Amino acid sequence: AQKITQTQPGMFVQEKEAVTLDCTYDTSDPSYGLFWYKQPSSGEMIFLIYQGSYDQQNATEGRYSLNFQKARKSANLVISASQLGDSAMYFCAMRFTGGFKTIFGAGTRLFVKA
Amino acid sequence: EAQVTQNPRYLITVTGKKLTVTCSQNMNHEYMSWYRQDPGLGLRQIYYSMNVEVTDKGDVPEGYKVSRKEKRNFPLILESPSPNQTSLYFCASSLGTGKETQYFGPGTRLLVL
């Protein structure tokens, strides 16, 4: 069964420190894409980073990087130098190339402490 | 400005009263999708559309209908809403289904009494 698991319902991090948000997935499809989205308290969904299943290198976008371990089926989001504005809900999602289905994890709420 | 718009943003209704949530995108995207967000469950896909007149069920389609008569519009119809459809609804669109991210609308918060 295709599934995304985010095991951390909530996390705290000190401002300026790095934090890792966990995401594991389950699929037998060889071709897929992994996405991370941020949802601040205002409610909008903001795209952060993408990793393709065939990409050899881990994706990076500014302070965001994706630690992709294909054999372990994990796609953890690393936020470096956390800022107060990073306090939000974070969702991991998987999309199947050539198909149209997208599944999301339950999310991790991140709190950044000053 | 490239965007996905949804209307209404907030809606309170009663059980059984038909309603439509509109979704429109101005990016000429072929792919559109509806999700509902519930606490502890993340976002779950309701329906998606690959192009005009082509739609398919997601994971939680029961109680919902969609139509795609024009490329830019993808309305979500609740013909007989029930309290378990109280949720936050998002419409999204994307150019394709590969690495292109989906662009999300602002969300519609629905309360069914």
Image (tube, helix red, strand yellow):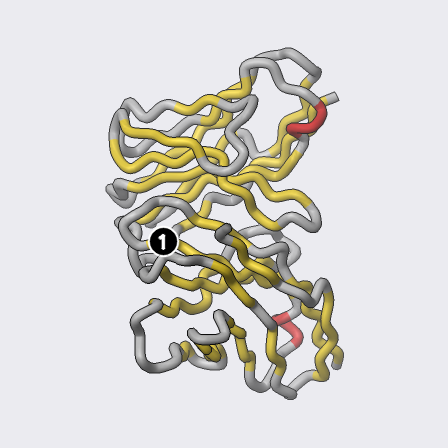
**Res. B82 image quadrant:** top right
Please give left or right for residue A82 compared with residue B92 in the image. right
Q: Answer above or below: position of A60 versus A98.
A: below
**Res. A95 image quadrant:** bottom left
Please give left or right for residue A10 compared with residue A102 in the image. right
Query: In the rendering, at what x and y percent does residue A100 appear?
Result: 35, 44
Residue drawn at point x = 50 percent, y = 74 percent: A72
**Res. B11 image quadrant:** top right
Amino acid type, residue under disc 1 in the picture: Phe
Secondary element type, mark 1: strand
Chain assignment, label 1: A
Query: In the rendering, at what x and y percent does residue B34 appear?
Result: 46, 37
Q: Answer above or below: position of B53 versus A51.
A: above
Instruction: Please state which of residues B43 and A62 is positioned toward the viewer in this rendering.
Output: B43
Please give left or right for residue B91 compared with residue B51 in the image. right
Residue bearing mark 1: A96
Residue drawn at point x = 58 percent, y = 86 percent: A81
Instruction: Please state which of residues B36 and A62 is positioned toward the viewer in this rendering.
Output: B36
Residue drawn at point x = 68 percent, y = 69 percent: A110
Callout 1: few (<14), some (14-19), or many (20+) C-alpha neighbours within 10 Å? many
